Image: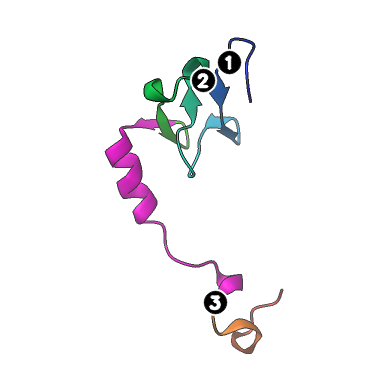
Amino acid sequence: MRTTDGTIVYYLDGKIHNWDGPALIPQGNKRLSEYYLFGIKHTKEQWEDKKKDVNGVPWYKTSAGKSAGARV
């Protein structure tokens, strides 16, 4: 969502959240960016650590594919 002053905010289920980068960019200024996951503010380093902890590939993109019983 972009406000009239240029602030960019990403939401998920009503909470500030973005796995792909900063969730709050005040007035479009990337130097002031803030990182949030599920509404909880993190430093950039904390956000990067949590992003690395995400568990691999989704079930529907496994190399086993349909032979493992994954219905697409």
Instruction: Name the side, left or right, on which 19 lies relative to 8.
Output: left
Q: Which residue is mark 1?
A: 6
Tell me the quarter of the image containing the N terminus. Answer: top right
Label 3 secondary element: loop
Q: Which residue is mark 2?
A: 28
Q: Are marks 1 and 2 in contact (CB under 8 Å)?
A: yes
Query: Which residue is depicted at the point 58% across and 72% down?
Result: 61
Mark nearer the N terminus (3 vs 1)? 1
3 or 2: mark nearer the eye: 2
Q: Where does the image place residue 25, in percent across and percent down from the top left?
A: 48, 23
Three-letter amino acid code of the residue under disc 1: Gly
Three-letter amino acid code of the residue under disc 3: Thr
Quote the CA–CA distance across marks 3 and 1: 40 Å
Label 2 secondary element: helix
Which mark, by number, is residue 62?
3
Mark nearer the N terminus (3 vs 2)? 2
Callout 1: 10 Å neighbours few (<14), some, many (20+)? few
Above/below status of 35 relative to 55: above
Instruction: Name the side, left or right, on which 16 lies relative to 30.
Output: right
Query: Which residue is depicted at the point 54% across and 31% down?
Result: 15
Residue 3 inside the magenta-drawn segment: no
Quote the CA–CA distance across marks 1 and 2: 5 Å
Q: Looking at the image, which is closer to me, 4 or 46?
A: 4
Query: Which residue is depicted at the point 60% across and 30% down?
Result: 14
Q: Which residues are magenta?
A: 40-61
Three-letter amino acid code of the residue under disc 2: Gly
